[in-house]
């Protein structure tokens, strides 16, 4: 029986790649990559020559069974996403679940993920929190926002720069304009920044200064 490794990759700064991750990626029989072009640059940087195969949200449903058979036959396979830890708002869950059901060993390495530094940097309570990831783009979005408006724990969202202003405006509408919000952008990269204020203030800031890069929003829970 083979083994599936879930291997985190840097979210920006290549120095965040762990020695263990490099070793595992060198030793496995195959690397499943969300985007082979993006991951190819990472592997080239660390001189990793292991064969890659595409594994992303559009094909993972079709490839899981074949991958499970390869693992059952004794192959060792590593799964990586474009950045961060696989299966956290990225492909990985379906294959992991299939491996667990077939008693194939799964080993997730510790490493980079965007929401942890964003949460710690926010200054908001982090003893209890909810990771929400991306909100539904259309259907079910308002229902979800109404439900989360009553959440008392700190809430973490991922968002694209193109939808940030809309999302912050909806936070002001559904959660209250004075709800405390922290917006972390381009974590670990050259232009990294974390801005804090009310939902209304953050919406106005990014209206005046359109955002770029990957974004994590941390929102205070409703006061009890």
Image (cartoon, grey):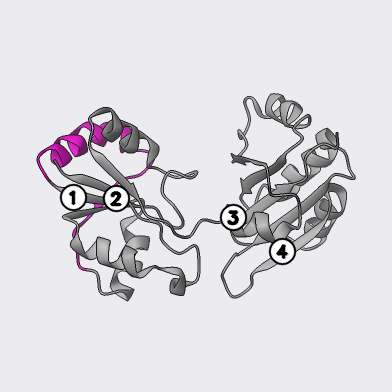
Above or below 195: residue 70: above
**Nearer the N terminus, badge 4 or badge 1?**
1
Query: From the viewer's perspective, is the residue at label 4 or at label 2 nearer?
Result: 2
Residue found 37% across the figure and 55% down from its top: 109
Indicate the quadrant containing the N terminus: top left, top right, bottom left or bottom right: top left
The residue carrying mark 4 is 194
Residue labelled with disc 2:
5
User: Which circle's residue, 4 or 3, is located before the other in the chain?
Assistant: 3
Residue bearing the label numbered 1: 76
Q: CA distance from mark 4 to mark 1?
A: 39 Å
Percent coordinates x, y for residue 121 in the rendering: 69, 61
- Quarter of the image where the C terminus is located: top right
Q: In x, y percent, where is residue 98?
A: 29, 31
Above or below, comparing residue 132 to residue 25 in the picture:
above
Of residues 18 and 132, the one nearer the viewer is 18
Separation (CA) of disc 4 from disc 3: 13 Å
* 99 is higher (above) or lower (below) than 127: above
Mark positioned earlier in the residue sequence (4 or 2): 2
Q: Residues within 10 Å of mark 4 (few under 14, many from 20)?
A: some
The structure residue drawn at horizontal position 41% and vertical position 48%, both measured from the top left corner, is 86
Mark closer to the observer (4, 3) = 3
Give the residue drawn at x 45%, y 74%.
Answer: 15
Q: Which residues are magenta?
A: 49-74
Give the crowd class for mark 1: few <14, some 14-19, many >=20 residues within 10 Å.
many
Residue 39 falls in image quadrant = bottom left
Closer to the camera: disc 4 or disc 1? Answer: 1
> Residues at badges 2 and 1 in contact (C-beta under 8 Å)?
yes
């Amino acid at each position: 029986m083979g083994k599936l490794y879930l291997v985190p990759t840097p979210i920006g700064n290549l120095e965040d790649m762990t020695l263990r991750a490099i070793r595992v990626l060198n030793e496995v029989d195959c690397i499943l990559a969300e985007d082979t072009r993006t991951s190819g640059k990472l592997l080239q940087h660390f001189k990793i020559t292991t064969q890659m195969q595409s594994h992303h949200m559009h094909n993972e449903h079709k490839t899981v069974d074949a991958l499970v058979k390869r693992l059952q036959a004794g192959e060792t396979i590593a799964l990586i996403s474009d950045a961060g830890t696989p299966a956290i708002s990225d492909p990985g869950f379906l294959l992991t679940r299939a491996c667990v059901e077939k008693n194939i060993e799964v080993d997730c390495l510790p490493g980079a993920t965007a929401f942890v530094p964003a949460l710690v940097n926010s200054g908001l309570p982090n003893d209890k929190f909810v990771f929400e990831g991306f909100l539904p783009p259309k259907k079910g979005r308002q229902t979800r926002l109404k439900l989360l408006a009553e959440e008392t724990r700190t809430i973490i969202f991922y968002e694209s720069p193109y939808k940030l202003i809309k999302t912050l405006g909806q936070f002001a509408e559904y959660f209250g304009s004075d709800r405390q919000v922290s917006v972390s952008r381009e974590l670990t990269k050259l232009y990294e920044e974390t801005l804090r204020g009310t939902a209304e203030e953050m919406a106005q800031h990014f209206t005046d200064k359109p955002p770029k890069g990957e974004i994590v929003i941390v929102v205070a829970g409703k006061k009890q």
